[in-house]
Amino acid sequence: MLNSRFDPTDAEPRLYKAWEDAGCFKPSMDTAAEPYCIVIPPPNVTGVLHMGHALNHTLQDVLIRFERMRGKNVLWQPGTDHAGIATQMVVERQLAEAGSNESRASLGREEFTKRVWAWKEESGGAIVGQDKRLGISADWSRERFTMDEGLSEAVKKVFVQLYNEKLIYRDKRLVNWDPHFQTAISDLEVENKEVDGAMWHFKYPLEGGETYTYVEKDEGGNVVFEEERDWISIATTRPETMLGDGAVAVHPDDERYAPIVGKMVRLPLADRLIPIIADEYPDPEFGSGAVKITGAHDFNDNQVAKRHGLPMLRLMDERGCMSDVDGAVPEKYVGMDRFAARKAVVDDIIALGLMVMDTDPETGEETPRIEDKKIMQPFGDRSGVVIEPMLTDQWFVNAEELAKPARAAVADGLTDFIPANWAKTYFNWLDNIEPWCISRQLWWGHRIPAWSGPDPERIEEFTDNPFTGRKYFVASSFEELAQLAKDFYGQNCEIEIADEGLSSFTRVPATGEWKKVRLVQEPDVLDTWFSSALWPFSTLGWPEKTEELDMFYPGAVLVTAFDIIFFWVARMMMMGLKFTGEIPFKHVYIHALVLDAKGQKMSKSKGNAMDPLDLIDQYGADALRFTMARMAGMGRNIRLSEQAVEGNRNFGTKLWNAARFCQMNECANWDGEVEPAELKHPVNQWIVSEVAAAFTEATAALEAYRFDDAAGAAYKFVWNTFCDWYLELIKPLLNSQDDEAKAETRRVAGWTLDQILKLLHPFMPFITEELWEALSEHGPKRDGFLMLQDWPDFGPGYTAPEASEEMDWAIGLITEIRSTRSDLGVPAGAKVPMALVDADKTLRVRLSRHGEVIARLARLETARAEAETPEGAISTVFGDTAVALKIADLIDVAEAKARLDKEIKGLEKDITGLDKKLGNANFIERAPAEVVEENRERLADSKLRVEKLSAARTALEQL
RNA sequence: GGGCGGUUAGCUCAGCUGGUAGAGCAUCUCGUUUACACCGAGAGGGUCAGCGGUUCGAACCCGUUACCGCCCACCA
């Protein structure tokens, strides 16, 4: 016999192990079955399971378990992502905390990378174990890691091909530089935040002491200010960048500066001459209308600098400290941190008297013009430091080219976003796509398969500077690389391949013959998203032509949150189409974000993060999963509260006890089919048709990714229909002396419970599996795990309209009597006589059939049909029948009257409204006939009810 | 600035094709009747953000205003 409650802490690990040991998570590989594949968005190997994962993984598991039960050949491909920066950061932090004087720098690349691998083997992928606690049924035997051997091969192969097609190239461009991690990061990893800042106004003196008349006019063209100036005012929020200015730009229509466009100014501190240029970029209304142009440290300025061919002078090193790499930074600032340099530059400008000064109109006191201002500043989303736009050499993917088919695939409906709105976001990004910077100056990741040697065309540059004049060889293996190099330098040239250091060469000057060349591999690694972009096919064995690739690609659906549409979805589309010629998945289901109960994003720093593992400990995985599914409506975010999880745990307990009731009553599972037509008892016919309806609804909802509707339908069926009504309605049958009735009911109840377990299984795998097994004890031997049973497909034969009508009537009558009793204050324990008055033959038959259960559930002494309202009875109305209850001596008659009056009043209001509606010729004429008819019936009903209620009211008067 | 979404019961939200406004939680009343108090029965609670329009009929469609979110791009 079952205990009174389900114990998840005992059952969950036991069941999970049993499933895994039995290989339940593996695809059937049945070639006759339709393949169904989902690749998991690989969590970071450093990750711990948070609520976002819990939702994401639950929804995928619901789909996976559902489709597996539907007989498809199901693969859920799991794995983790190497997460370049995040992982490197974890290991660096550990080194720092260990206090052993070891650091990334002291260890060197090779040793450091070894340590990261060691960390990965030991503590990485903790999330996998946590996922198992959630009950997810991914095929762990196929678990992959973005840096494992096969995936690394795929990465190299893709890189080489794109390079050879010139879709990957090297370029010197402005990138977002993270001075903390000392690497380039992508636009998407930058978060713009508003912070307190200031705007300084500097005077740049005109060269040669030239002057001009600076005139400001109001809208009417009247002069409001006029001054002779030998300087131009510029405003900046980042004074330190002035050292790299290449020009001052003004708008071509700005009359104030028209006289000096084309003249030169002498850049203070740097002591260089720079021109005043006209460009559309400056906004005359903002600041002074004149903008300093720092091509190497600002994205907008960079555009201007490119248009005008201005020099772009880099001012900082990789740490964000001032540096004279391009010879622009005066010695006194070299080595200063950029923020220290900012202060120094401002101080020096003030000292030079080159601040624009404001004069206090009253005291005449002069102060430098420094405005406090909210400014938008870019921050690295991992490091949290201010990002520096920096001009560096990087590797780029021509994303624009790859985006075209990716865009078309969605536009043409090969891949659908669900909800469809997200396609707009996707298009919008692809339509404005920038070159994708894929190189990262990190050590943890896929090292770029490019080696450089001397370029004969630029051999001077090469020997002068190890960072320029290089010829790149891109290859996916050493053999291939050596061959490429020999093809280039000559077959007799000795090729040496080095991991780091400097490349070098030996060449016979007279003949130009290369004797020996040392090629050095690029130090950079690839953006983590480069390997993630290949995930849908690399995990299936690509570039090998594997059976799995053939079978499971393209995947059925990608399930993810909207925040990685750009990072990941778009890039998988690009790479999938490019390398397989097919879309990577047919649907992209975008689910909500999980927020706290107040609707705020959960975060550790806010302290409002809920830990899914805590919730699982306390309420069980099923409760958490069911909560997630029930709340996963489209479009909206999910506000998760512990209370909600508790409520769903209670639902599990309810189910458990319903099963216990079945067990007590020997309602064995029944391994046969059931159809309503074969059954004798309306209540059994009815529940079978209700089961079919619940499955039909849940199936349709799951097919449409409406998890909330599917879970809601199951919840409602189980709690309201099965527990609240069916189990109560069959109690008399189970206790009856009629063996045939008892047997049928036991079987139908057992069968229904089995169907419930299947229906709930995708959402609540543990409790359902546990019950499935427990119930086997008394019934026929179960054939394997519940999770591998067939999801039933009920055809139209499962409806039982007559039985449904009959049961609806009985349920309605019970409800009506209960409501009346409660309203009138009849003591709950009192058993009262009830009579249906004027009942027609159908109702009398129904009453005789269900009288016992009606009496039981409505606490009646007797339930009869009578010709007239018995003496001393108080009537209510159900349908068009008066229901007489002998309760006059138990209640306050005045209250009973009031109740009737209220109901009559309500009905009369309805009648007035309906009369008016039906009296409207337009309505009769234009509304569909069935709507008109419906309204007529409603009117007739209401009138009849008023009549009956009024009669009851009159009878009351006479008491 | 561009885009997307939201505003419905005290709270969180459903409401699909326009046809009598719903659920869960919370609240109140009653109740231990042999599955379940993590329970059961019953009840109260709404100007569907405002305004205008289309329509026989609008929570739903259109326009507009207000407020609240989020995303993208941003003024040096």
Image (cartoon, rainbow, N blue to C red):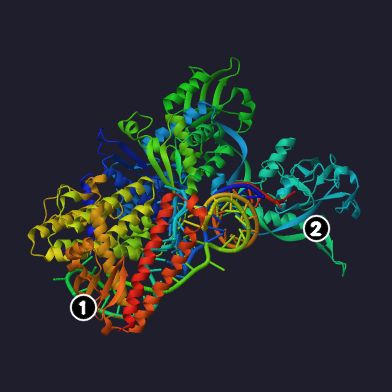
Query: Is label 2 on the same chain as label 1?
Result: yes
Which numbered marker is on residue A292?
Answer: none
Between B44 and A549, the one lying in front of the other is B44
Which chain's residue wears label 2? A
Q: Are marks 2 and 1 in contact (CB under 8 Å)?
A: no
- In what element is the residue under mark 2? helix
Q: Could you tell me residue A661's position as x and y percent?
A: 18, 64
Between disc 2 and disc 1, the foreground one is: 1
Quarter of the rendering occupied by the N terminus of chain A: bottom left
Which numbered marker is on residue A831?
Answer: 1
Between A425 and A169, the one lying in front of the other is A425
Q: Residue at coordinates 53% horizontally, 44% vertically from top-left?
A: A425
Q: Can residue A102 be seen in this view?
A: no
Which numbered marker is on residue A351?
Answer: 2
Q: Could you tell me residue A245's position as x and y percent?
A: 74, 44
| Relative side of A376 to A581, left or right | right
Q: How many marks?
A: 2
Between A320 and A734, the one lying in front of the other is A734
Identify the image quadrant of residue A950: bottom left
> Relative to A771, is B40 above or below?
below
The alpha-carbon separation of the residues under discs 2 and 1 comes to 100 Å
Identify the image quadrant of residue A623: bottom left
The 10 Å Cα crowd at callout 1, few under 14, some 14 to 19, many 20 or more, is some
Q: Residue at coordinates 24% horizontally, 59% vertically from top-left?
A: A806
Quarter of the rendering occupied by the C terminus of chain A: bottom left
Q: Can residue A154 be seen in this view?
A: yes
Three-letter amino acid code of the residue under disc 1: Lys
Three-letter amino acid code of the residue under disc 2: Ala
Q: Could you tell me residue B63's position as x and y percent?
A: 63, 51
The first of marks 2 and 1 along the sequence is: 2
Which chain's residue wears label 1? A
- In what element is the residue under mark 1? loop
